[in-house]
Image (cartoon, grey):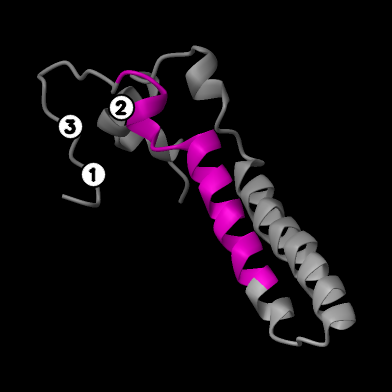
Amino acid sequence: MITGMRSARRPERVSALRAYPDDAASERLTKGTGYTVFSYLIAGMLAYGGIGWLIGHFAHISLLFPIGMLVGLAISVGWIIYRYGRPHELGTPPTHELGTPPKGDDR
């Protein structure tokens, strides 16, 4: 039997979601952010792996291909951290009515 929306049974979680500000910092993280991060990782590995393969092919050093992939991965991770950072650095943390975080499933 469906009695209503799930959020109606847990109003403390709804108020916690509404506590985040609606400014430019919170708009940076959207539903497509995960796909963007994944594409940065793949693109970095492909680009620098390709450069490593190209140099390694002409220099006859096959080890440059995996080294290039690892360098590309490291640069991509650094770019992701620089661009998205930690959520609390993007804006001010949410404030709650009583000063304590809402109690949810992860107490």
Give the Cα distance between marks 2 and 1: 10 Å
Give the Cα distance between marks 3 and 2: 8 Å
Q: Which mark is residue 16?
A: 2
The image quadrant of residue 54 is bottom right
Q: Is residue 83 left or right of residue 59?
A: left
Q: Are marks 2 and 1 in contact (CB under 8 Å)?
A: yes
- Badge 2 marks a residue whose secondary structure is helix
Residue 40 drawn above or below residue 14? below
Q: Position of residue 35 (x, y in %)?
A: 68, 50
- Badge 3 marks a residue whose secondary structure is loop
The magenta region covers: 68-92
The structure residue drawn at horizontal position 76% and vertical position 86%, both measured from the top left corner, is 61
Is 35 part of what is drawn in magenta? Answer: no
State the residue in front, 95 or 72: 72
The residue pinned by badge 3 equals: 101
Q: Is residue 1 left or right of residue 11?
A: right
The image quadrant of residue 83 is top right
Q: Earlier in the sequence, mark 3 or mark 2?
A: 2
